[in-house]
Image (cartoon, rainbow, N blue to C red):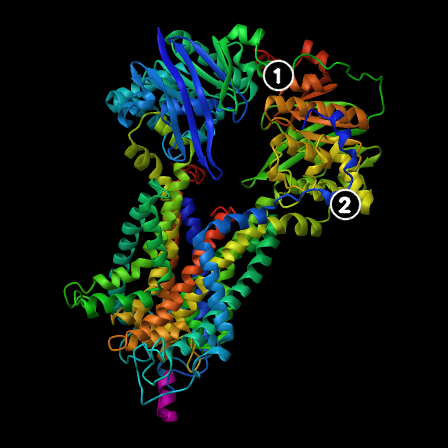
């Protein structure tokens, strides 16, 4: 890299773009950093493992979901029933696997709802700016100030305990933070000089958003999405525990924990295994989220 | 500063009105009435009951009379606890919930802030890893799981502490307070660690060290205030979380507080009690959000002088 | 009398790539009342050396490998924490580069001022306050009684640096370490601060270590100069010897990089048709609900093939003018480009014109999209304007890399894999990719080290000549402007105060503001 121009003719034989070595993109660098973070990597594998098991539950579950063994009743963990059985003699491992399907589904779907609304809302507000931004974010502030937990409880009471409503209600809470994060990101990036450069090149708004803004706002969105899933799962479990979420015969980890609490003095495994399952998934998601945050170099800021 | 508080108060009023209105209509449009019990109620009795509770009036007039009573601080009679007003029930339940909440906040702030600050002073040290891993356990162990587990361990297996109640036996307040505060202690620890780390990397901390100030002065006088700002901003949401968390804690530990009333009212479709509690809790939460905002602004001199007055 | 003797200082840092040596085998000494300037570019280890002496390197990740620094009979590198703390801020004081971030925003100015006295000399608060107010007067802070209770954010940058100086002096130190104390300040303020430091030194017989990247700043100030490069001392000695007769190649290079003198062959055409005519340009922003007029009724022409310098201090609105012309911010008035009125065009109509006018930005770290390869960055404008496609596009990109002096092999790399100077070359490449007629260059070299700065300036001059470009060159650095520009306009608080040929204006500035700018720059 000498001063300017004279030294470069020697390279004129190197004409083919393909022959040159590719650089390391920031995504690649982030992946390298994530791979060095043992805790995050283990978490990722645990999540994949549990996810696959829950996906395949109907085919690999050791017993039927409703299959009872009243003669056996509640039995401690054994070779036949790894997690033990409940008071009706149903295999707890099977029930935890089925419950996991519901818990994870709620987590993923409600997060997807939150992601869609939040990203759209935040991106529009952040990129448009001015009055539109002010009004949109004011609205977010107002909704933010509502005591949501109480509202969700109320909603579940009033409209019965439907799964769909649960998704909507939880998604409706969680999108707010996402909208704030995305809006903050977009606003910051929009003021960066490479976006000004894109404007001065003459790139259209759509192309600027697609090529310059989205790729750079993706990091925080990924991190926050990872951290939203455990929040959503907690919320679902909280409602189910109060009897306001998932209803029998459907079951989730929250429901199983609630059932386990009732008989924990005599049959502690009924509490411990579903609790363990929930905690392990929450742990893994949080560790993975923290790992991604470090790897993608996302600063913890909301506005 | 006063203008800031006033403007925040003015913003809180529409929020509160939205809460009240939504609650009112949500509950009224709900399928299933308050008197749909196990046995059929005689139509004439039902009519009399509805007249007694104003349910025969047009919806809008019900709404406005509810608002009118609310302004006077009257939340009406309870449907399911005959002869008792919602005010009475809240009066009976809230002191217990308030006490529980205060202990929980204390647990959260004391344990959380100390753990967070000490972690931040030696990042990536053993004590940092230990307290941050513990905090992570706190975050991933919801109260409805932690509570029963603590009961199992300290109440049933070790028999050190009572398993339920509030103020009946010595030491029965410990487990509920710790359970409710644990999650928030974990969040506070993470926030204060992050806040302190951020502050300690600032140039003005280097200036303070360059002046030869003792390390405890650098940290306590120059670092702590800014480092705790994220925690102060979090107090509002934490308070809201603790109030709704009391629903779970009070059912797990069988405490007759407001949270328990609320959940029971929700199950029993006790309209007036639900509305009363919702309005009451929402007001509290909004007020605490306001206080936490004001405190954050007060602690930041730049913001303070922007808002006028020192 | 020797004040400080440093021997064989080596400092390392643990990084992701293992242990990196930041400073190796540094030795120097300083007498009372003497000024030692430590000069070097970024990463030379000049600050790390001084922070090591002061015990201000956080360990880990830092590690003092070896050496001694004897001050007043105490070896600062091998003493207890308490011993070195008793020296810091007491016998050795420091001032730092950025006065905006170096004062605690949560404590009043007075509170921070008196701390060294209270902790080192155990004096009472009222006594300390008395002393602080005396010092505030001495360093030129007006109404010290009231300002004692002011918050740092109520002060300007120059005032804060005065507070920093007062704070450093309050415990009567014998040695002052000044780490780039004027770099973040405007030229006129810079001069005031340097004069203040010189005056105080004379009065108190203070030893000063002056850390700077700028040999120009150092020359009127230092008794001794020490030049550092990548952690090593390359040359040290008497200031006059080093500056006038540098022995080491690197020192020579540094000195040669300082822009000096006038442009070699300025353009002087007789009354050419202007390329761009700016008339009654007004740009306003909303700041906290108030209208703020950043550019106030500005008129000027840009001629074909000339480099027009636009000079002003921070906040004068000079960047806003450049952005207004390119329609990056909304403005009123008229910008006429070869008969086209730019300010009335919609984005669709602007697009063909955008090809003709481009921008180079100040911060090469923010001006390149970190997620795009060099190829993508350079190809984007050419694809958009249909200049080239397919294999032709590949050739055009490679050609462009030759033009700006980047090796072709880097074409598929990402911006973060390059140094600041290389990034600025990429940004320049993007600006000339559409073969524009006019370029706005907004402080394109002020974020770069002097030696890199020189290369980029040469590149800009080369490209302007080769492609017959017109350029609006925005800068706060008068020496750079003089070296590069044909004509210059001077901006103050959004208003144009003076314009003319560079040399004419240099010889005879008519406006007071221009005079003070020039005086400050030529200290």
Can you give x and y, in whole percent of width and height, for residue C411 in the image?
70, 40
Prevailing secondary structure of the magenta residues: helix
* Horizontal side, residue C301 vs residue A22: left or right: right
Is C124 drawn above or below residue B84 in the view shown? above
**Highlighted magenta segment, given as a residue range:** B37-51
Q: Is residue C176 magenta?
A: no
Q: Position of residue C186 (x, y in %)?
A: 55, 22
Label 1 or label 2, whichever comes before in sequence order: 1
| Residue drawn at point x = 54 percent, y = 6 percent | C241
Q: Secondary structure at mark 1?
A: helix
Q: What residue is rendered at 67% in x and 39% in y?
A: C329
Q: How many marks?
A: 2
Q: Quadrant of residue C270?
A: top right
Give neighbour class at mark 1: few <14, some 14-19, many 20+ (Cα, 10 Å). Answer: few
Question: Which residue was labeled with disc 2?
Answer: C346
Q: CA distance from mark 1 to mark 2?
A: 49 Å
Viewer-side label of 1, 2: 1
**On the image, numbered disc 1 is attached to which residue?**
C253
Q: Check disc 2 and report its element: helix, strand or loop.
A: loop
Asked which quadrant contains residue A136, the reply is bottom right
């Amino acid at each position: 890299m000498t001063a300017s121009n004279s030294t470069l003719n020697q390279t004129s034989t190197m004409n083919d773009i393909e022959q040159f070595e590719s650089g390391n993109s920031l995504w690649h660098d982030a992946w390298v950093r994530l791979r060095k973070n043992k805790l995050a990597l283990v978490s990722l594998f645990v999540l994949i493992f549990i996810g696959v098991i829950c996906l395949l539950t109907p085919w690999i579950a050791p017993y039927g979901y409703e299959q009872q063994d009243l003669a056996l009743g509640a039995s401690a963990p054994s070779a036949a029933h790894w997690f033990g059985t409940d008071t009706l003699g149903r295999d707890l491992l099977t029930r935890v696997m089925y419950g996991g399907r519901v818990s994870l589904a709620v987590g993923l779907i409600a997060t997807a709802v939150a992601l869609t609304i939040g990203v759209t809302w935040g991106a529009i507000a952040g990129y448009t700016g001015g009055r539109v931004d002010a009004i949109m974010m004011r609205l977010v502030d107002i909704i933010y100030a509502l005591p949501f937990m109480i509202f969700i409880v109320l909603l579940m009471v009033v409209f019965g305990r439907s799964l769909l409503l649960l998704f909507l209600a939880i998604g409706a809470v969680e999108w707010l933070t996402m909208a704030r994060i995305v809006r903050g990101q977009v606003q910051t990036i929009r003021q960066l000089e490479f976006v000004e450069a894109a404007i001065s090149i003459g790139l259209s708004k759509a192309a600027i958003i697609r090529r310059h803004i989205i790729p750079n706002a993706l990091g925080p969105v990924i991190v926050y999405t990872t951290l939203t899933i455990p929040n959503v799962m907690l919320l679902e479990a909280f409602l189910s525990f109060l009897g306001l979420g998932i209803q029998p015969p459907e079951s989730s980890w929250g429901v199983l924990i609630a059932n386990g609490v009732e008989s924990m003095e005599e049959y502690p495994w009924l509490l411990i295994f579903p609790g363990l399952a929930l905690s392990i998934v929450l742990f893994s998601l949080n560790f993975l989220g923290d790992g991604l945050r470090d790897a993608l170099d996302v600063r913890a800021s909301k506005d | 500063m006063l203008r800031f508080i006033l403007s925040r108060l003015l913003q809180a009023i529409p929020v509160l009105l939205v809460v009240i209105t939504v609650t009112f209509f949500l509950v009224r449009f709900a399928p299933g009435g308050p008197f749909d019990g196990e046995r059929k109620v005689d139509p004439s009795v039902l009519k009399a009951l509805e007249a007694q509770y104003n349910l025969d009036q047009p919806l809008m007039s019900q709404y406005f009379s509810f608002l009118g009573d609310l302004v006077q601080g009257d939340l009406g009679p309870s449907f399911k606890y005959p002869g008792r007003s919602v005010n009475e029930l809240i009066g009976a339940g809230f002191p217990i919930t308030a006490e529980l909440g205060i202990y929980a906040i204390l647990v959260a702030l004391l344990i959380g802030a100390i753990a967070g600050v000490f972690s931040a002073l030696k990042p990536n040290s053993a004590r940092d890893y230990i307290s941050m891993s513990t905090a992570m356990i706190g975050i991933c162990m919801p109260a409805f799981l932690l509570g029963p587990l603590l009961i199992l361990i300290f109440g049933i297996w070790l028999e050190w502490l009572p398993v339920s109640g509030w103020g009946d036996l010595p030491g029965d307040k410990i487990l509920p307070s710790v359970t409710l505060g644990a999650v928030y202690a974990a969040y506070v620890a993470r926030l204060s660690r992050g806040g302190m780390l951020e502050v300690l990397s600032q140039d003005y901390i280097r200036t303070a060290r360059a002046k030869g100030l003792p390390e405890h002065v650098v940290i306590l006088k120059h670092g702590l205030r800014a480092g705790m700002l994220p925690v102060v901003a979090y107090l509002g949401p934490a308070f809201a979380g603790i109030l709704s968390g009391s629903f779970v804690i009070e059912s797990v530990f069988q405490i007759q507080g407001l949270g328990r009333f609320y959940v029971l009212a929700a199950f029993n479709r006790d309209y007036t009690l639900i509305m009363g509690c919702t309005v009451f809790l929402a007001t509290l939460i909004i007020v605490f959000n306001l206080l936490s905002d004001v405190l954050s602004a007060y602690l930041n001199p730049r913001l303070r002088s922007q808002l006028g007055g020192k | 009398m020797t004040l400080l003797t440093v021997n064989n200082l080596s400092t390392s840092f643990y990084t992701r790539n293992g242990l990196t040596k930041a400073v190796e085998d540094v030795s120097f000494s300083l007498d009372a009342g003497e000024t030692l300037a430590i000069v070097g570019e970024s990463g030379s280890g000049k600050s790390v050396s001084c922070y090591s002496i002061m015990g201000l390197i956080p360990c880990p990740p830092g590690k003092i490998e070896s050496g001694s620094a004897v001050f007043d009979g105490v070896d600062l590198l091998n003493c207890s924490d308490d011993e070195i703390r008793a020296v810091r801020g007491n016998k050795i004081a420091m001032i730092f580069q950025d006065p905006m971030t170096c004062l605690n925003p949560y404590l009043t100015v007075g509170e921070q001022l008196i701390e060294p006295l209270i902790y080192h000399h155990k004096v009472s608060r009222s006594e300390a306050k008395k002393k602080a107010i005396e010092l505030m007067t001495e360093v030129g802070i007006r109404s010290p009684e009231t300002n004692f209770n002011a918050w740092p954010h109520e002060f300007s940058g120059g005032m804060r640096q005065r507070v920093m100086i007062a704070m450093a002096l309050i415990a009567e130190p014998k040695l002052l370490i000044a780490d780039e104390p004027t770099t973040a300040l405007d030229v006129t303020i810079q001069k005031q601060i340097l004069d203040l430091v010189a005056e105080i030194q004379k009065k108190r017989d203070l030893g000063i270590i002056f850390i700077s990247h700028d040999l120009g700043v150092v020359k009127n100030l230092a008794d001794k100069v020490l030049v550092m490069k990548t952690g090593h001392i390359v040359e040290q000695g008497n200031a006059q010897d080093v500056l006038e007769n540098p022995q080491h190649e690197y020192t020579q290079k540094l000195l040669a990089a300082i822009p000096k003198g006038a442009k070699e062959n300025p353009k002087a055409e007789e009354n050419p048709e202007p390329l761009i005519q700016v008339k009654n340009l007004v740009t306003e922003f909303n700041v906290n609900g108030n209208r703020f007029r950043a550019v106030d009724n500005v008129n000027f022409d840009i001629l074909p093939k000339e480099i027009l310098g636009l000079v002003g201090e921070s906040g004068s609105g000079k960047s806003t003018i450049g952005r207004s012309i390119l329609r990056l911010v909304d403005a009123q008035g008229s910008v006429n480009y070869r008969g086209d009125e730019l300010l009335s065009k919609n984005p669709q109509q602007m697009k063909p014109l955008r090809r003709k006018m481009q921008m180079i930005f100040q911060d090469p770290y923010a001006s390149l999209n970190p997620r795009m390869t060099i190829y993508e960055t350079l190809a984007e404008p050419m694809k958009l304007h249909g200049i080239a496609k397919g294999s032709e596009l590949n050739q055009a990109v490679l050609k462009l890399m030759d033009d700006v002096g980047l090796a072709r092999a880097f074409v598929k790399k990402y911006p973060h894999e390059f140094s600041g100077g290389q990034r600025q070359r990429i940004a320049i490449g993007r600006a000339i990719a559409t073969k524009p007629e006019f370029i706005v260059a907004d402080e394109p070299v002020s974020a770069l080290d002097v030696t890199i700065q020189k290369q980029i300036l040469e590149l800009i001059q080369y490209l302007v000549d080769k492609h017959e470009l017109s350029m609006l060159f925005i800068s706060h650095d008068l020496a750079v402007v003089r070296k590069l520009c044909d004509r210059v306009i001077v901006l103050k608080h959004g208003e144009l105060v003076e314009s003319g040929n560079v040399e004419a204006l240099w010889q005879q500035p008519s406006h007071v503001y221009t005079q003070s700018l020039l005086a400050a720059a030529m200290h």
